[in-house]
Image: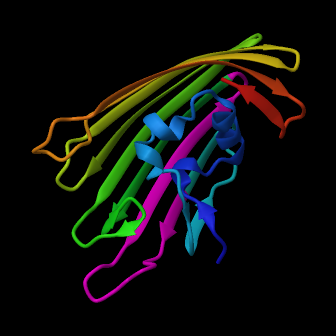
Amino acid sequence: MTQYTSVANADFETRMETLKQLADITGVTLNQGNFSRREPNSLQYWSPDWSGLTFRANYSVNEGKTATVNPYLYSASVTYRKGSLYASYAWEKHFDQSGATPTAGVDEEGNIVSASYVLGAVKLFGQYGEYKKTNTNTQKSYLAGAQWTIGRHVLLATYQNSKDGGVTTAEQPSCDLIGVGYRYDFSRRTSLVAE
C-alpha cells in the first residue's frame, strides 16, 4: 500500500488552502501535527461526491507492533462543498501511540470542525478542535481568519488560540498566535508568502 495523509487532513485542495494560510495551522490549533501526519500502510475509502457531500474513512495498520504495544488508528471525515461554502468534520483515534511514537496504554482522539465562506474577494474561515490523550486534559483550539484577494495578490490575517492539553497534574499550557501577511499566487499550485 502507499502512504497517505490521515483522513483528518486528506482533502488535497483543502490542505493546500490551509498551507496557503498564515501562521501554519498545524502548530497551534492542530495538536502539534499529531492529527495531520502521513500514515504508512493505510486502507482508505473515499465516497463519490453526492451534491457536494463526501465521506472518507481510514484504517492504518499496526506498524511497530511488539509483544507489549499495538499502535494503529481509525479516522473518518465528512465534507460539504457547495458554491462559496465549505464545511467539514473530522474524527481520528490513535491507539497505543503518543504522537507518532508507539506507546503502550496511551490513546489519542481528535475532533475537528472547520468552515469557510467566500464573499466576493473575501474568504472567511475558521476551525475548532478538541484533542484528548491518556492522562492529559482535553486540548481545545480554534482559528479565525480572513483573506482578501486582489488579482494575484492576497492579504491574510489569522488569530489562533490553543489551551490545555497538558498532563492532568501540571499547569496547563496556553498559546495565542496572530498572523498578518501577504501572498502572491504565481499559479494555482505555486505561491510566495511573506508574514
From the viewer's side, name the closer residue of 31 and 118. Answer: 31
| Camera sees residue 29 | no
**Residue 63 to residue 115: above or below:** below
Q: Quadrant of residue 118?
A: top right
Q: Residue extending furthest bottom?
A: 67
Tell me the residue at 39%/36% (across/down).
129
Question: Does the magenta segment cover residue 23?
Answer: no
**Residue 191 to residue 167: above or below:** above
Residue 65 horizontal/vertical position (percent): 37, 83
Magenta stretch?
A: 57-84
Q: Residue extending furthest front?
A: 194
| Camera sees residue 59 | yes
Q: Answer with left or right where residue 84 lies relative to residue 95.
A: right
Tell me the residue at 42%/54% (across/down).
92
Residue 11 horizontal/vertical position (percent): 65, 47
**Residue 148 to residue 47: above or below:** above
